[in-house]
Image (spheres, grey):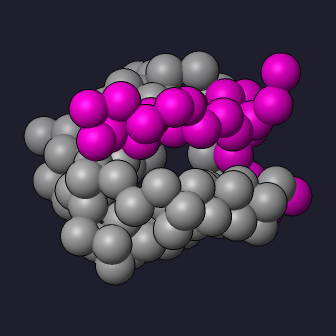
Amino acid sequence: MDVVSVGTLTDGTLPVVLRGEVEFTNAARIRETISAAIAGERPAAVRVDMSEVAFLDSSGVGVLVDAMKAAWEVGASFAVVETTPRVYDQLRIAGLLDVFGLS
């Protein structure tokens, strides 16, 4: 199973699912996949499900920030809709809960 999958645009929402380890070894590929999907689909909203993410490093956090920026560039809203407790804590410590719609 791939670490990133982008679903079919439904009701203007582009669903993105991240799994496993989101870190420096795969961050560039994940960033490229998400950015290309956003640019190609031009959704009204991007929703990222991280309920299957076991590990997230600073590169992974950067992927989320870049995805949010890509969404904003096409006028889409952006939110992380599910996380594991560990990922939630990492995003809380980074001060990103409000920005990602998790508070």
Q: Is residue 72 left or right of residue 51?
A: left
How many dots with numbers? 0
Work out which quarter of the rendered image holds the N terminus and state it: top right
Q: Residue at image x 79%, y 60%?
A: 29
Work out which quarter of the rendered image holds the C terminus and state it: top left
Residue 7 colored in magenta in the image: yes
In the displayed structure, 39 sits above or below 2; it is below
Residue 61: in sight, yes or no? Answer: no
Percent across and percent down for residue 90 are 43, 46
Q: Residue at image x 55%, y 31%?
A: 7
Residue nearer the viewer, 76 or 55: 76
In the displayed structure, 83 sits above or below 103; it is above
Q: Residue at image x 59%, y 38%?
A: 6
Q: Residue at image x 28%, y 41%?
A: 12
Q: Is residue 34 left or right of residue 41?
A: right
Residue 22 colored in magenta in the image: yes
Residue 59: in sight, yes or no? Answer: yes
In the displayed structure, 53 sits above or below 71; it is above
Percent across and percent down for residue 32 are 70, 65
Percent across and percent down for residue 54 are 65, 27
Residue nearer the viewer, 101 or 41: 41
Q: Is residue 22 left or right of residue 94?
A: right
Percent across and percent down for residue 93 are 34, 53
What range of the chain is rendered magenta? 1-25
Q: Quadrant of residue 37?
A: bottom right
